[in-house]
Image (tube, rainbow, N blue to C red):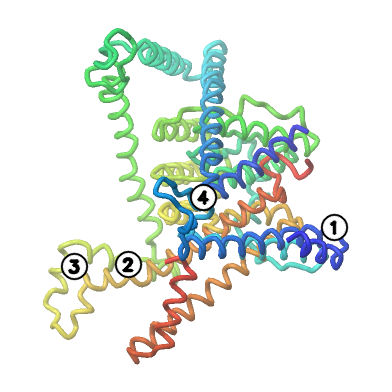
Amino acid sequence: MRITHKILCRIFTNHSWKCVATFLCMAMCCASASALLSSCISNAPLVDTAIATPTTTTAPPWFNSEKTALFLWIVFIGAAVTVSVWLAKSGRPIRIRRIAALEAVDNAVGRATEMGRSILFVPGIQDMDNIQTVAGLTMLGRVAKTAAEYDATIEVPTCRSLVMEAARDTVRASYLSAGRADGFSADRITYITDDQFGYVAHVVGSMVREKPATCFYMGCFFAESLIFAETGNAIGAIQIAGTAESSQLPFFVAACDYTLIGEEFFAASAYLSGEPAQLGTLRGQDVGKFAVVVLIALGVLASTILVMAPNTAAAVWFLDVLQKVLGG
Amino acid sequence: MKRIIPMWIAIIGGFAMMLSSFIPLAESAGEMFADVFNVVAAIAFVLGAGSLAKQHLEKLSRRDAGWGYSIITLGSFLITLFIGMLKIGIHPNPSFPQAAYSGSNDAEGSAWSWIYEYMITPLTSTMFALLAFFVASAAFRAFRAKNTEAILLLGTAFIVLLGRTFAGVVLTGWFPDWASGLRLENLSIYVMQVFNTAGNRAIMIGIALGVAATGLRILFGIDRSWLGGGDA
């Protein structure tokens, strides 16, 4: 691995290339090691039977061979993202389709400023160990920066103490980067309760009383999604939502003006930043999506062939391989 | 420095959690990071309680509109805290009869469980029940046939709603066997199993890739906006 790394670093003298080379070496090493280990684990005993005694205990395996397919998928997507980031950094233009919900953020914040009303930002009801909450806070950073530039007030009620602390840091840094450090008030980012419907009662009550002009719902939501969105609709607020909870998406789509559906929600931060490195990750994501689409198409084709000609050996073999590739 | 340290904690913690999923020997490292998270969350809870108290005490001192509710909130908070910490009405655990506070707060007949069962549960159920009315009002708005997409949505909802009730069977049950696929209950199953599953899986695949890409952005330190800005 060390020799491969040196060779690649010689070829790629640029620092970014070195990062890519290092990552590829790491990925290659991990992939080969995992394949080797999983084959060793499945085919050979861990202890040499020639010298083994009845008292010998078997050590736990180095690698969980049941997750080899998942590991290789992570390596593949990681490599695709890394290469895409490098390509983006080297100046290759990246075209990202327009996302209406994100285009509307500036207008929504501007509307609140013009109306002299506050902006409500709800970062979901889960803790910081949920990736949706982290994605929600990245959006909060962007929204807070725009709010600071427009001199609008942003209210962030939270359902978890840790989220409150993280949100305070995020908003403080956004105000600082907008050159409006004096406009930041920690009292606008508050902890309410861990209880789901206790939190709903507070947020809905405050919406009805204070009538925010703009409501953002970005994070992990459950039954409260429709209660928030319908209340926001009733008070005439412009509403932008984003979640990866597929069961709550129809409610947001029905009741909000704009909705970030699934992957759009995770792409929001990169989209709004406009930084080549971040946009590159979106292209890497698309490479993964393309691979999935190709596999689905081939799987459908093989299944159709099997239905039409049940004993086609090639189709049976291909479906077997596909099942292994997908870790089934 | 204030951003570099949290970023490195996130990077190391993230990689440790990921490796613990694949390498059984690293499982303890993953568990350790999960425990650290729980400890940090517990400490942050004190900050949360402080924020709640400060928020309502300020409201009381300013005599803001609705300050009476702040008294109720603070009173309920303190009473529940007092009852929970002193374990009022809880008998000691039979395994440790000498230890007065060894009983569980969830024990039947305790004051804390009474509060939970007769106050929190009904209040929670009341809020949840509001959802029924919100579903009706959202459906009323979403199902207006204003354009082609809305008409498609309305038609699909009509098939699924009728197909899942006895009305669907009554209306189309007389269809002959060769046209049984057109019976509303069968159409409803077809819509849910084919169109709905296909659409749902497409969204789920997108979400999975989005989660992976976001995770990698954070683990590689490319996305630092969750720390409040791009500069470390």
Point 71% across, 63% down: residue: A24
Given the image, what chain letter belongs to the residue carrying mark 3? B
Residue A44 position within the rendered picture, expressed as x and y whole percent measured from the top left: 47, 63
Q: Residues within 10 Å of mark 3 (few under 14, many from 20)?
A: many
Q: Residues within 10 Å of mark 4 (few under 14, many from 20)?
A: some
**From what the image shows, is residue A12 above or below residue A153?**
below
Do marks 4 and 3 both belong to one polypeptide chain?
A: yes
Residue under label 2: B192
Residue A214 position within the rendered picture, expressed as x and y whole percent measured from the top left: 58, 43
Label 4 residue SS: helix
Q: Which mark is residue A15?
A: 1
Quote the CA–CA distance across marks 4 and 3.
48 Å
Given the image, what chain letter belongs to the residue carrying mark 2? B
Residue under label 3: B168
Quote the CA–CA distance across marks 1 and 2.
51 Å
Point 59% across, 47% down: residue: A135
**From what the image shows, is residue A139 above or below residue B148?**
above
Q: Which mark is residue B21?
A: 4
Q: Quadrant of residue A183?
A: top right
Residue type of the residue flagged with mark 2: Met
- The answer to the question of whether label 4 and label 3 lie on touching residues, with beta carbons closer than 8 A, is no
